[in-house]
């Protein structure tokens, strides 16, 4: 398992929170928002990379 601590952990936390704000601010379905949120919370590093590549692009 990937363990991130210190400054890199803090940066990752900020990025994941930023991604979650964009996910919940998007105009996608509630199910889609829930899937993205779970992915970002359970697998923060990999989830963030996947969100950057395939996540919602528009914010309402």
Image (cartoon, helix red, strand yellow):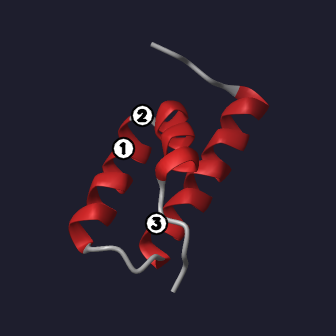
- The answer to which of marks 1 and 3 sits earlier in the sequence is 3
- Label 1 near label 2: C-beta < 8 Å? yes
- Label 2 near label 3: C-beta < 8 Å? no
User: Residue 30, relative to residue 9: is it above or below?
Assistant: below
Element type where label 1 sits in the image: helix
- In front of the other: 1 or 22: 22
User: Is 12 situated left or right of 48 in this image?
Assistant: right
Q: CA distance from mark 2 to mark 1?
A: 6 Å
User: Is 48 situated left or right of 8 in this image?
Assistant: left
Q: Position of residue 35 (x, y in %)?
A: 28, 53
How packed mark 1 is, by other alpha carbons closer than 10 Å (few <14, some 14-19, many 20 or more), is some
Which residue in the structure is indicated by mark 1?
39
Residue drawn at (73%, 28%) of the image: 6
Which residue in the structure is indicated by mark 2?
43
Q: CA distance from mark 3 to mark 2?
A: 15 Å
User: Residue 57, relative to residue 39: is it above or below?
Assistant: below
Residue drawn at (28%, 62%) of the image: 32
Residue drawn at (52%, 16%) of the image: 2
Which residue in the structure is indicated by mark 3?
23
């Amino acid at each position: 398992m990937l363990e991130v601590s210190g400054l890199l952990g803090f940066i990752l936390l900020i990025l994941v929170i930023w991604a979650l704000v964009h996910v919940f601010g998007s105009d996608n379905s509630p199910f889609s928002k829930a899937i993205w949120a779970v992915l970002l919370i359970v697998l923060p590093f990999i989830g963030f990379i996947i969100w950057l590549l395939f996540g919602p692009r528009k914010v309402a």
